């Protein structure tokens, strides 16, 4: 019995943290600036949990029945949180309002759980053992959730299904609590029936998760969505209208197949043509392989090394028929070596030199990307250049983002490059 009770604590804690991580991740994908989104979501969530813990003292009767009802509400609201937020972003202008309203409601309900459970269990355990065991399993549950979320849940299930899965776990805890504490629940048959209905709704949502995501995507993007995938690092969406393919990463347009050649030719050819006898080329970022495609047009280039963080991105542009055709099969070419790693530590550990380096990163819209536009990063790149080598950098737009553009120019000059 004790093992089952503390397993409930473990699962409750895991579910609560998963909903918090989903809210922060989804806000980062859709609104950008991950530091701001996670900071405000986590702060609001913890504040709401404090409110829930304080409110628990006003619940004095029927504690087990109230605990079961709270679990069902957490499971239902938390389970459908990701779906509702995606749809709110697509169909309304109230995404932020709904985001923080949902974070507050879930946080209050989660804050009620542990105090109520401790009061329910106080008759079965000594107080010191109860507090120690409950908090131990609570923290273990949080640890388990924090590891599962980026490693398994997001890459395998995505945000919509992950939320629904943990909603099912909450509802499952509610249902088995009606059997564990059957002698202490008035109207347990009704609670069991409601639990089964909530479980059925969550199972139906899990089965229809793709339809929910597709409905949101169809409204968010003007063209037909032909591929939508969530990786450990980003959300990849590919749209098509006639012969125009467009790639979006975290809702930001990366390229249109109709005119991407203008950008990639300008990125690669002026710099590479200025290098005498370039043999070894390094491309940092550019997991779509389009910059590599341009580099391979030079027969004197013997080896191209592509370093991109997202393994799913490079796999997609290697194996997907339409996308590999777009980059002319560049990522599968014999002269190309693909390495999936963070460019910054990879450069720190690298020992080989290159005649030409292309830094083809997305615009520095957050801190994780911003580190790739620093003097420290450019100095690392300079150490990997041969004596007559050259570095080219994606530098936003001098017309539409003048401040960012000139900041990058000045950073390069401070790192010792001539621009």
Image (cartoon, rainbow, N blue to C red):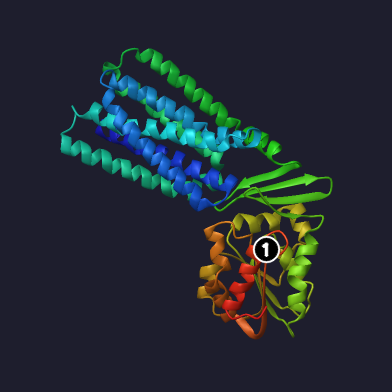
Residue 391 found in image quarter: bottom right
Q: Position of residue 337 (x, y in %)?
A: 65, 69
Q: Is residue 209 left or right of residue 62?
A: right
Observer-nearest of 57 and 148: 57
Helix, strand or loop at disc 1? helix
Q: Position of residue 141 (x, y in %)?
A: 36, 42
**What residue sits 76% from the left and 42% below the top?**
223
**What residue sits 34% from the left and 21% below the top?**
66
Q: Quadrant of the C terminus?
A: bottom right
Residue receiving disc 1: 402
Q: Is residue 189 above or below residue 391?
A: above
Q: Position of residue 58 (x, y in %)?
A: 28, 24
Q: Is residue 70 above or below residue 309?
A: above
**What residue sits 80% from the left and 62% below the top?**
261
Q: Is residue 14 left or right of residue 116?
A: right
Judge the density around disc 1: few (<14), some (14-19), many (≥20) Cα neighbours within 10 Å.
few
Q: Is residue 11 visible?
A: no
Farthest residue toward the bottom?
Answer: 387
**What residue sits 53% from the left and 70% below the top?**
346
Q: Position of residue 278 (x, y in %)?
A: 72, 81
Residue 176 found in image quarter: top left
Observer-nearest of 366 and 120: 366
Q: Is residue 197 left or right of residue 65?
A: right
């Amino acid at each position: 019995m004790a093992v089952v009770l503390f397993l409930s604590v473990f699962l409750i804690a895991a579910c609560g943290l998963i909903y918090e991580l989903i809210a922060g991740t989804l806000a980062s994908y859709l609104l950008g600036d991950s530091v701001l989104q996670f900071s405000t979501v986590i702060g609001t969530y913890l504040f709401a949990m404090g409110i829930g813990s304080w409110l628990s003292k006003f619940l004095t009767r029927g504690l087990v029945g109230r605990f079961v009802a709270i679990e069902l509400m957490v499971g239902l609201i938390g389970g459908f949180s990701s779906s509702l937020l995606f749809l709110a972003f697509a169909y309304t202008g109230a995404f932020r309002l709904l985001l923080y309203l949902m974070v507050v409601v879930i946080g209050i309900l989660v804050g009620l759980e542990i105090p109520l459970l401790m009061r329910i269990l106080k008759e079965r355990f000594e107080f010191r053992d109860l507090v120690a065991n409950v908090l131990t399993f609570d923290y273990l549950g949080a640890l388990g959730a924090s590891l599962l979320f980026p490693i398994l849940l997001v890459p395998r299930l995505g945000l919509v299904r992950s939320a629904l899965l943990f909603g099912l776990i909450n509802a499952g805890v509610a249902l088995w609590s009606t059997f564990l504490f059957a002698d202490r629940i008035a109207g347990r048959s009704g609670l069991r029936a409601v639990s089964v209905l909530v479980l059925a709704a969550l199972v139906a949502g899990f089965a229809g998760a793709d339809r929910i995501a597709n409905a949101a995507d169809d409204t968010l993007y003007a063209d037909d969505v032909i591929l939508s995938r969530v990786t450990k690092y980003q959300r990849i969406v590919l749209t098509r209208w006639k012969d125009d393919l467009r790639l979006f990463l975290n809702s930001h347009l990366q390229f249109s197949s109709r005119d991407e050649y203008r950008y990639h030719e300008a990125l690669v050819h002026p710099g590479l043509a200025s290098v005498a006898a370039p043999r070894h080329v390094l491309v940092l970022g550019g997991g779509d392989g389009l910059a590599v495609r341009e580099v391979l047009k030079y027969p004197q280039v013997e080896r191209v090394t592509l370093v991109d963080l997202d393994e799913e991105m490079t796999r997609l542009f290697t194996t997907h028929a339409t996308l590999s055709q777009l980059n002319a099969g560049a990522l599968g070419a014999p002269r190309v070596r693909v390495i999936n790693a963070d460019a910054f530590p990879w450069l720190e550990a690298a020992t080989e030199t290159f005649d030409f380096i292309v830094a083809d990163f997305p615009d520095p819209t957050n801190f994780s990307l911003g580190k790739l536009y620093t003097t420290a990063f450019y100095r690392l790149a300079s150490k990997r250049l041969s004596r007559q080598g050259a570095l080219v950098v994606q530098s936003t737009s001098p017309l539409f983002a003048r401040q960012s553009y000139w900041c990058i120019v000045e950073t390069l000059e401070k790192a010792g490059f001539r621009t």
